[in-house]
Image (spheres, rainbow, N blue to C red):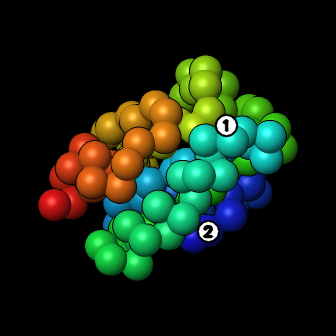
Amino acid sequence: MITLTTDNYEEQVLKSDKPVLVEFWAEWCGPCRMLGPVLEQIEAEHGLTIGKLDTDANPEIMARYGVMAVPTMLLFENGEPVKQIVGAKPKRLLVSELGLS
């Protein structure tokens, strides 16, 4: 998984020629910590590029997309958000909601 920051966000997400799933998370968020290994499995099994964005360190990006809770995941295609998933979910539901099954 890619660690996203204000410095690399545009290059890694907005200019990517492949879909990118951005997880908005925070160190203090228990569900975020549970979601991490699930996202690593999805990335390995489905080849989806996944980036983690620490909302405490990068609040301006969180605000840009109106993210109000963590964890929130936004799927970007061609630099635009096309799907939003709020909250930690089991792997099978995430795979289904992302259209990877």
Where is residue 49? Give x, y as percent.
44, 68
Q: Which mark is residue 97?
A: none
Q: Secondary structure at mark 2?
A: strand
Where is residue 78? Give x, y as percent.
34, 53
Where is residue 16? Give x, y as percent.
44, 64
> What amino acid is found at the position of numbered circle 1 in the picture?
Ile
Q: Is residue 26 positioned above or below 63 on the image?
A: below
Q: Is residue 19 left or right of residue 53?
A: left
Residue lying furthest right in this view?
57
Q: Is residue 96 positioned above or below 46 on the image?
A: above
Q: Say which residue appears at 31% left-offset and 39% top-offset.
A: 82
Where is residue 91? Give x, y as percent.
35, 55
Q: Name the residue beneath numbered marker 1.
A: 61
Q: Name the residue beneath numbered marker 2.
A: 2
- Residues 32 and 15: in front is 32
Q: Which-is-in-front pick, marks 1 and 2?
A: 2
- Asked where in the image residue 85 lies, by quadrant, the reply is top left
Q: Is residue 78 visible?
A: no
Q: Say which residue appears at 61% left-offset and 25% top-offset.
A: 69
Dividing the image into 4 quarters, which one contains the C terminus? bottom left
Q: Say which residue appears at 38% left-offset and 67% top-offset.
A: 42
Q: Earlier in the sequence, mark 1 or mark 2?
A: 2
